[in-house]
Image (cartoon, helix red, strand yellow):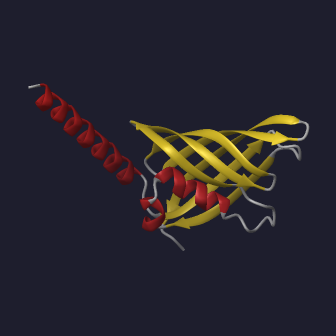
Amino acid sequence: MQRQKNYFALLTLAISSALATCAHSQSVTAGQWQLSSVMQGAPSGEHKSSQSRCIDDAAFAMGIEQAILNANAADTSSGKPTLKCTVSALRRDGDQSSWQTSCEGPRGAMPGTGNAVIQTGRVEIKQSFDLKTPFGAMKLSQVINAERIGACK
């Protein structure tokens, strides 16, 4: 009897997870996305960027959060080094998610955490990092607002 209860609990969890993933994938679709990003706490001051990127189904297959972070890191127009982050330990609850992140930037590796709110055609990502410097640790934060603006150009 206990074994059946455990099996039922596992099955319920798997179905719930699949439905949550399906709901997220339906609310965020491939297309042209406008990305606005603000990085605060860096020694060089606040850094803002805005760009339009085509994000395809293959990118979203890696996960909504990772796809938006990768598209944001692809900023080649500014000529400035970008922040390349990898999402791990992703947890989803309804329209929100949270994760651990490991980022490579102009000053080296930075561990951190992130969270997102995912809505139809819109994603807001917030990340915070600990940057170790010779002068001590610094707290950095990043906010990315992404909005689907149409089909890819």
Q: Quick one: which residue is furthest to the bottom in this view?
A: 153
Figure quadrant of the N terminus = top left
Is 39 positioned to the left or the right of 68 in the image? Answer: right
Residue 112 appearing in the image = yes
Residue 95 appears in the figure? no
* Picture quadrant where residue 34 is located: bottom right
Q: Where does residue 113 sit, x and y in percent of width and height?
A: 61, 38
Q: Nearer the viewer, residue 131 or 150?
A: 131
Q: Does residue 147 sit above or below 79 in this rendering? A: above
Q: In front: 84, or 56?
A: 84
Picture residue at 33% right of the left edge, 47% below the top: 23
Find residue 37 and report its horizontal and vertical position in percent: 69, 50
| Residue located farthest toward the left when viewing the structure as drawn | 1
Residue 137: x and y in percent read 81, 35
User: In terms of depth relative to the viewer, which is nearer, 43 or 36?
Assistant: 43
Relative to 60, is 110 above or below? above
Residue 67 shown left or right of residue 79 in the figure = left
Q: Quadrant of the C terminus?
A: bottom right
* Residue at (17% x, 35% y) in the render: 7
Q: Position of residue 76 (x, y in %)?
A: 73, 68
Residue at 29% from the left image edge and 46% from the top image edge: 18
Number of numbered discs: 0
Q: Residue at x 86, y 34 (%)?
A: 136
Query: Furthest-top residue in view?
Result: 2
The reply, left or right, for residue 24 in relation to residue 75 is: left
Which picture quadrant has residue 61? bottom left
88 or 122, nearer to the observer: 88
